[in-house]
Image: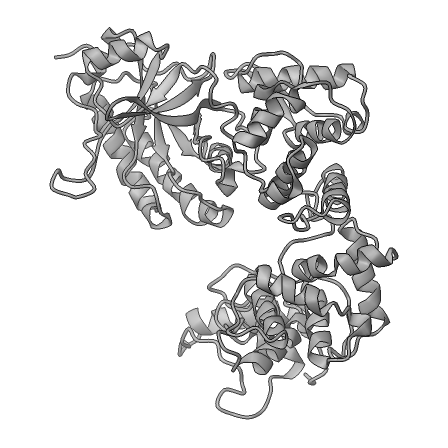
Amino acid sequence: MRLNHTADETMLRAIRSLIQHLREEAPKRAGVMILPHSYNYDTECPGNLTMYAQQGSTIDPAVDWIGLSDIYVFAVQRWVNATYATAPGYVRCPENGRTGWSTMLALTQGLQHELGISPTVQNFGPGTFNAVKARGVLPIQESQPNFIRLYNSALWCKGYWASLNLALWNGDSQASLEALYGHAGLSYSDTAQRNAMWPHVVKALMRMDQFRLVPNGDTTIQTIQKRLNQRYVASVGIPAMGLVPCDGVYGRDVQQGFMMAIQYEIGIAPSSINGYFGPGTQNGLRTVGSGTLTGNLRYLFRAACYFNSPVMLGTPQVPHGPLLYRPDDIGTDTATSTHLEWLRAFQQFSQIPQTRTNDYTTWAQLLVSSGDTGRPAGGCDCITEITAARGQALFAAGYRIVGRYLDEHLPPTDPYFRNKALKPGEPQAILNAGLRLLPLFQYNGTQLFNFTYQKGYDQGKIAHQKAVEHRIPAGACIYFAVDYDALDIDIDSSIKPYFEGVKVGLAELGNRYQFGVYGSRNVCTRVSADVGARWSMVGGMSWGYSGNLGFPLPTNWAFNQIREYEFQPGWGLDHDVWRDNADPGVSALEPGE
């Protein structure tokens, strides 16, 4: 193989198979290290194989096949590490030909160094933004080679074709930059906008945000994203707002930009806009937002409908559908029958009044996972023992079901002991008060390492045992908690295996009890779809969680925890919307001995 040859998939898979053979089947088995042939020598691996000659690459049989690396990204990684290794604060990125946050942040630090910022940090913050703005030099005007190298490098890492000579800004580089402006909803041909948006574009270049449709991206969402950038970043110039991704996916950054757009349209001054669903935003939605909508605010309301589409029809026990929001309804002022029907279905699914209007409760439900935290709810949960008097107080306040924990794993001497476990006789006291019981289970559950298959398996069996001890009847659903903002990578690596363990543990004891999941919308949806949780209890009051931003309510939601407050002095209570005709909870106990 010659130096200018490029390894293809067939070759890499052959190398992978050879390594596996040497590790497992060869007469004299090899070790597990993967080293380049140039190890301890000055020569180079031919055909750009160096980026594969390391642990965890696609040729390593110990990891899943992850495809080919990119020789141009590899060149960028080697250059940025070699150039800025001695810059104060610089953090090396892996040299593996695969773009990612580590590479983009390394480029950001390189940019900071060239701008005279020291020490460099792994964040494109206001200082970096303002330094780019103050310098005000676009690549076509740039005379400093390292700036050109950084911009070309960022284009390569973002999937755009750029100059093969990183130090040269050529026609390919310029065409890609102009394309990026357009993909972000901006105009490069408009000189004023081109120059004003340059710091925003540089920041976008140095992030992992995508501005082209990704697999499973939605073209209508992409259109909305571009409009947000054009109107609220380029035209209005909201100070706190940066370019939102234009990838066709309604995610956290888009949701925050979308909230800022709404704040502007309901009359909040640009300098006060922060993307926070606070009292000012709520008041604006109760007044301006609940009136007759036209123009941009009407567009945003209907875009919010589309973001929350589809909704399921039918009942929680027998759902059907889904009902999609029609893209054509976003751009019209007409109250079409399809818009009104979708709105009614959404309100019904969310268990809010079916007004078919843009009232405050509907706005809140569209925008944040907690929705209108002041709305009535029939459910609650707490760590406090429910005595006869407390049960009567809950019933008088309108509650009809209360969530309580089946067990606590910490001893009373532990500083984190909360005395939260259900007490002997307490289930009967709850039922005697006219309430139902919602069984919860949580041992820690606040960090990633709390979730493994073995822990799920063990805790599933413990939950079964405790439920039997409290005479909870067969068929009841026990909710196992994921009480932190678990990302998709966490869900795949640990959360799903934990629930698989719960599932097996319960099954080995006869499947007497169903299992449910407590967590963010994303956690609930994925555990339900992939592992089979019967019901979801959504931690909606944590509306800032990434797993609650840009994700609809799970189809199988039974409870939505929307507010925490002090019900009585020293007695904290979570206020939970209890969905009609969903999980009935525990209304009777097994006979005692």
Q: Residue furthest bottom?
A: 42
How many labels sit on residues? Answer: 0
Residue 54 horizontal side relative to residue 132, left or right: left
Name the one closer to the observer, 300 or 354.
Answer: 300
Q: How is the image coloured?
A: one colour
Which quarter of the rendering shows the C terminus? top left
Which quarter of the rendering shows the N terminus? bottom right
Tell me where residue 72 appears, x and y as whole percent: 69, 72
Q: Is residue 1 above or below residue 187?
A: below
Residue 82 seen by the camera: yes
Name the one closer to the observer, 391 or 126.
Answer: 126
Tell me where residue 208 appears, x and y as whole percent: 62, 57
Q: Quadrant of residue 542?
A: top left
Tell me where residue 346 appears, x and y as whole percent: 62, 20
Residue 263 horizontal side relative to residue 225, left or right: left
At 69% from the left and 79% from the top, the residue drawn is 146
Tell me where residue 213 appears, x and y as whole percent: 73, 48
At 18% from the left and 32% from the top, the residue drawn is 419
Q: Is residue 463 above or below residue 104?
A: above
At 47% from the left and 16% from the top, the residue drawn is 579
Residue 456 horizontal side relative to residue 145, left or right: left
Q: Quadrant of residue 160?
A: bottom right
Residue 320 seen by the camera: no
Q: Residue furthest right?
A: 189
